[in-house]
Image (cartoon, grey):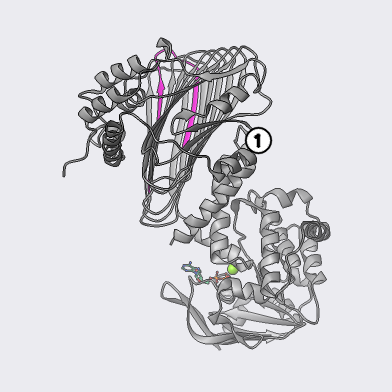
Amino acid sequence: MKATGLNQDLLRAAVEEFPADEFSAARSSAVAKLAGVGFPTVGDEDWKYTNLGLAAEISNGWLKTIIANHGAIAEQSNSEQVAMICQEIDAHWIIIQNGIIASDSLAELDGQAGSGISLSKLEFADKDDADDDAMSLFNVALLRDGLRITARANATTDKPIGILLADSPSSAVTQTRIVIDVGDNAHLRVVEYNLSVDPGRQFTNSVVQANLASGATVDHVRIQNRADDHVGVNKVTVNLDRDASYNHNSFDLGGALTRNDVITKIAGKGAAVNLNGLYLATGTQHIDNHTSILHLVGPSTSEEEYRGILAGSSQCVFNGKVIVSPGADGTDSRQSNHNLLLSDRAEIDTKPELEIYADDVKCAHGATVGQLDETALFYLRTRGLGMDEARKMITRAFAAGTLSTLAVTECQDHLAKVLDQRLDNLIGDGQ
Amino acid sequence: MLEVKNLKASIVGKEILSGLNLSVAAGEVHAIMGPNGSGKSTLAQVIAGQTDYEVTDGSVEFLGKDLLELETEERAREGIFLGFQYPVEIPGVNNAYLLKAAVNAKRKHHGLSEIDAFEFLKLAREKMAMLGMDQSFLNRGVNEGFSGGEKKRNEILQMAMLEPLLAILDETDSGLDIDALKAVANGVNSLRDPERAIVLVTHYQRLLDYIEPDYVHVLSGGRIVRSGDKSLALELEERGYEWVREAANA
Ligand SMILES: Nc1ncnc2c1ncn2[C@@H]1O[C@H](COP(=O)(O)OP(=O)(O)O)[C@@H](O)[C@H]1O
Ligand SMILES: [Mg+2]
């Protein structure tokens, strides 16, 4: 069987149709670099379990439309869901629709989100130059817009900055690019919400880059609540200087296929990375979390806990890479991945990947895969709880652990609500 | 209230209960005693609906209903409570949350409205005070990290909140120090009521000093081999289980 690949000719032709703008040079350069590379395939070790064939198929179809429409991208209207999320999570919201920032939301917010915090359209500077992996290049190759958040030294926000990626299949392929620069001792809290405003097939590819100066803190909550047909590839790259800390909570609830890469680099002593994730999958959903923590120096710490609840015939992947560089003594790293399988057709592939090149290092990791405890279910039922209620109670408790580490508490109520709705689906599909 | 007739039950093909008969009426307190492995917990679990055990013969009626036809949760809502010999730890499930869900499941079954948060807390605090339990137990995971005695008190707390018609308490006295034993006995005695029946499963007669039974049964080899009043418990204490076993075989 021949897997669908990205059609490079279509890509080149479509990009040529794009109107000239500040990203033109970057786009051309990315198209050139991507030639001969293409999307990763299951032959690549890092993509062993995740097939981007559908992403390529959607892309090729969309590129044809772009060529036919001479580069015009369909407009998209606001939705009730957007309004609801903005209301339920108290944040300074920026709406990005199919990769294009709603300019009024940006203008309103710049200077309002806190003193020392500025929000602007991304100018593609050299230092933000794309990583040269295929999906980062693809992101730049089709880039139309981008967001830059800058926090000056010591800046803080009164409430989190919300970034709502409100995507719709009206544009079947969407690139989003966000760069976050946080100055010395500044503290930035960000909620990134990945939403499908309409059902239907869509492929989104997003890149978030964060640079944390000395003593800076970023709390980053990412909520992925995409439609059933959605294909999403998301990459977060974080660089940490001395004493900086990055706290990440991701919640993957929807989508047909989701691939997340969270890549953190600890380049300064005393820095700390906390990665927490929860993924809920049912039906034929596929969710792949790849994380990488690079300890370039020590002492430094990383703590990671991902939890998964899988029902139906879903398939999930957790791959946790920790690299301790030579000389990074005093590295303290802990990683765990726990999975609850509600169905015997669901599948989890979990793998820690430790590469340790320093001596004075503490690295612990553990993974578990289990089912609902029958004895616990029986116990709850002897107290009068119905089977589904008992299953839900135990499942919810399993998920709740990831809420207790939530760095942006403004999301708590909304998350509890959407998690609950999602758990109902999973329990219903369980057996 | 409870009529167990010729009950036979087995697990993994091994017969544990071999034709057990037991009749419990409202207002009564029964004690079931017997050596380890005689099938006491099996009886309790079968009545509660544990499907690991296969019922191969006999019948169990509760208030005239065929109990074996009901799901575990339906039995609970109808008024059966099992205090576990080994209460189950359920990490992350809040104790108060479970208590409230349990109370409401039962209320709903009987066509009553849900209990409100204030009323619930007031009731829970009252019962906890009676059992000498710290309020902090409400906010902990169900039995999570509880000591043996704390788990047993928690069972009694659940029972007190649910106000069952039939409470079966499986070795609720084991592993308790004297203060805990008194607190638990106090909790059980407070529930004694002409409408209610209590079945105490115990290995020792110690508990019966605090909760006085109307009837004492001895279970041996999967059957009740002897029944009597509370003096039977004292006799057992003196003469040991060998005595009934021999008597049963004789
Ligand atoms: N899950 C099980 N698998 C196999 N045998 C069991 C199981 N549970 C109980 N038994 C056996 O059933 C018998 C009765 O056990 P139990 O009812 O717990 O006795 P008691 O409560 O009187 O000590 C024992 O021989 C015990 O080993
Ligand atoms: Mg027992």
Image vertical order of residue A347 relative to residue A271, above or below: below
Residue A113 in the image: above or below residue B198: above
At x 53% / y 79%, what residue is drawn?
A: B221
- Residue found 22% across the figure and 32% down from its top: A7
Point out residue B190 in the picture as x, y percentages from the top left corner: 82, 70
Q: Chain of mark 1?
A: A
Please tell me whether the stretch drawn in magenta is mainly helix, strand or loop: strand
The one nearer the camera, A138 or A83, is A83
Image quadrant assignment for residue B150: bottom right
Picture quarter with ligand 2: bottom right
Find out if the beta carbon at label 1 lies less than 8 Å from the nearest ligand 1 atom: no
How many residues crowd mark 1 within 10 Å: few (<14), some (14–19), many (20+)?
A: some
Report x, y in % for residue B3. 63, 87
Between B41 and A336, the one lying in front of the other is A336
Residue B5 in the image, given as x and y percentages of width and height: 57, 88
> Which residue corresponds to the image point at 71% horizontal and 55% vertical from the top-left?
B96
Quick check: is A333 in the magenta stretch? yes
Numbered range of the magenta stretch: A315-336
Is B107 situated above or below A316?
below
Q: Is residue A351 visible?
A: no
Quarter of the figure with residue B234:
bottom right
